[in-house]
Amino acid sequence: MITVYLNRRIDDDARRESLFRGDFHLYSGIGGANALADHAKDLIGQAFEGLDPERAQYEMDVDEFVRRVEPLKREFTNGDRTKALCQQFAVDFGVDPERTYFDIPRLRVIPADQFLTAGVSYNYKAHRDMWYGHPQQLVNYWTPVFDVVGDNVMSMYTDYFDRPVKNGSNQYDYDEWVAKHRTAAAGEKTTDTRPHPLPLEDFESRGEIRIAGQSGDVFMFSSNHLHASAPNTSDVTRFSYDLRTINLDDVRAGRGPRNVDSGATGTTLGDFLRVSDLAPLKAEEFEDALTHA
Ligand SMILES: [Fe+2]
């Protein structure tokens, strides 16, 4: 059984335990999350210069769209203002700022009607974040920048939380991905030739759900959930950001959901920054604790 908790006031240790069992936690009205959504809105407004960003895809061709989105995503992910807001976000969620590290957030720009589904707007096929080299202990925070609907969010295949799916993650090595593929997104317009870890079997989910909040609402889940970008049939471009955290004690103790099917190698841990002061995590200290069963 998976429980969906709404605005539950709970300490972060207990909440992570709940997330690791597969529960979802939804929050609205968190200051840091709204501030990060507003920051994204500002950058998006600048990128589309007076156009309605949710409908700008209908005013330009794909090349022009990519030309605007690529620097927008880069600035959102790497900007100093973003990092400061991530610190506020995490503190507002009540995490321990000395024990918790975050990965710099990603802005997702998913146009409607198959306008662009590759490169900067890659539509993720079903995956667990672990297939991309993330640790089992990862907690994901997914936030719409503008209000979203079921037709343009993510699919969560809840019945596969602890059920394996045959997949290509054993061919995925994070270090190789960073070296060869991560910066190549803008060049991949119509097809995506990057070696994403994909499902290798058809699966039929009877537990698909879609969570559609308003701007700044936060959907927290364990990244062990199988999830995908739903094909956007909403007539507007979806803008959302996602932030991820890990707690060092979870990594050290090997807590987290059971790894049911990931064979990825390498780890993203070295990308994580400490909430208190943005110090990078020393991933080499955790080699023994990481499990890639
Ligand atoms: Fe994901």
Image: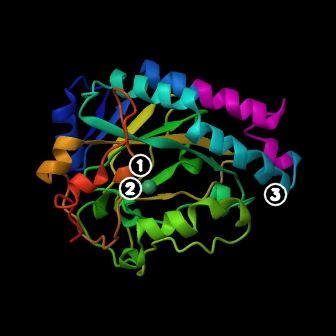
Residue 73 position by quadrant = top right
Considering only order in the chain, which callout, 1 or 3, is on the residue closer to the N terminus? 3
What residue is disc 1 on? 271
Q: Residue at x 22, y 40 (%)?
A: 16
What residue is disc 2 on? 268
Label total for image: 3
From which residue to which does the magenta span run? 38-58
Q: Secondary structure at mark 2?
A: loop
Q: Nearer the viewer, mark 3 or mark 1?
A: 1
Q: Amino acid at mark 2?
A: Thr
Q: Amino acid at mark 1?
A: Asp
Residue 193: horizontal and vertical position, in percent? 62, 75
Out of 206 and 184, give the one closest to the viewer: 184
Q: Nearer the viewer, mark 2 or mark 3?
A: 2
Q: Secondary structure at mark 1?
A: helix
Beta carbon at label 3 within 8 Å of ligand 1? no
Residue 95: horizontal and vertical position, in percent? 27, 28
Q: Quadrant of ligand 1?
A: bottom left
Circle 3 residues within 10 Å: few <14, some 14–19, many ≥20: some
Residue 140: horizontal and vertical position, in percent? 37, 44
What residue is disc 3 on? 62
Q: Is 208 located above or below residue 167 in the figure?
A: above
Is residue 258 within the magenta segment? no
Considering only order in the chain, which callout, 3 or 2, is on the residue closer to the N terminus? 3
Beta carbon at label 2 within 8 Å of ligand 1? no
Residue 214 in sight from this viewpoint: no
Is residue 40 within the magenta segment? yes
